[in-house]
Amino acid sequence: MMDISAASAASSTRKGHIIVISGPSGAGKDTIIEGAQRQLQLHQIITATTRPKRDTEIDGVHYQFMTNQQFLDLRAHGGMLESAQVYDYWYGIPYTSVQTAIDNGLDTLIKVDTQGAKTLKKMLPQSTFIFIRPERLEDLQNRLSRRNSETDEQLMIRIHKAEVELQEQVWFDYVIINANGRQEATIRLMIQLIQQIILTQK
């Protein structure tokens, strides 16, 4: 495990604040973050993954897509702040991306799964953790089904994992419910919450 250095950040006029956003697959994290970022325009750490790119995704925007060998080589040389294998694919937060944000005093968003969020909670305890969830588990199941990006077996695995991940919300600082038909309201709520969080850090 690699420690993030606070020494260089301490010398900055203002230390940037890190906001970690998580939640189960199908909760709408990407949609809410993208909508909020249109106004907030905060620095955002892009997660690296070995998962195949979906048709709607852009490399370097939604994820840093890597081969399995590229990811494992970077991980072996201490290049990942945290990493985990999820659904047979690797996901990780590049160490240098977070260190650069801290060095430059940037308020920063990091999107990770709940396992990664728990790791970051130990490594970056002063960060703020936000959990995005659907109003009902049935809503999440329907959203995952509409993707048509997994086999029936993979879909059942995701749904089961989502049920487990929903239990993790108890330790997050804030929980935002992304209800069906309320996407724009959820984005506005996320914007207001993050603005308030940053304001209290100044």
Image: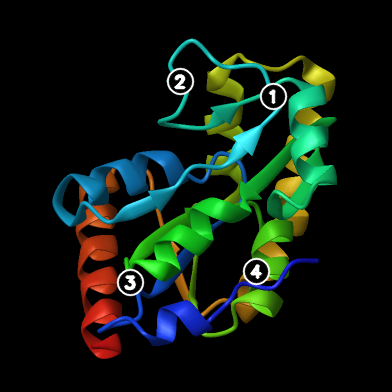
In the visual, does 161 lie left or right of 181?
Answer: right
Sooner in the amino-acid sequence: mark 4 or mark 1: 1
- Which residue is found at the position 70% from the left and 40% from the top? 91
> Separation of disc 4 and disc 1 at Cα?
21 Å
Amino acid residing under circle 2: Glu
Residue that numbered label 3 is attached to: 105
Tell me residue 201's x, y (percent).
30, 87
Tell me residue 70's x, y (percent).
75, 26
In the visual, does 52 lie left or right of 158?
Answer: left
Which numbered marker is on residue 176?
none
Residue sitting at the far top:
55
Judged from the image, the secondary structure of the residue bearing numbered disc 2 is loop
Residue that numbered label 4 is attached to: 120
Which numbered marker is on residue 57?
2
Sooner in the amino-acid sequence: mark 3 or mark 4: 3
Amino acid residing under circle 3: Gly
Sooner in the amino-acid sequence: mark 2 or mark 1: 1
Tell me residue 6's x, y (percent).
53, 82
**Closer to viewer: mark 4 or mark 2:** 4
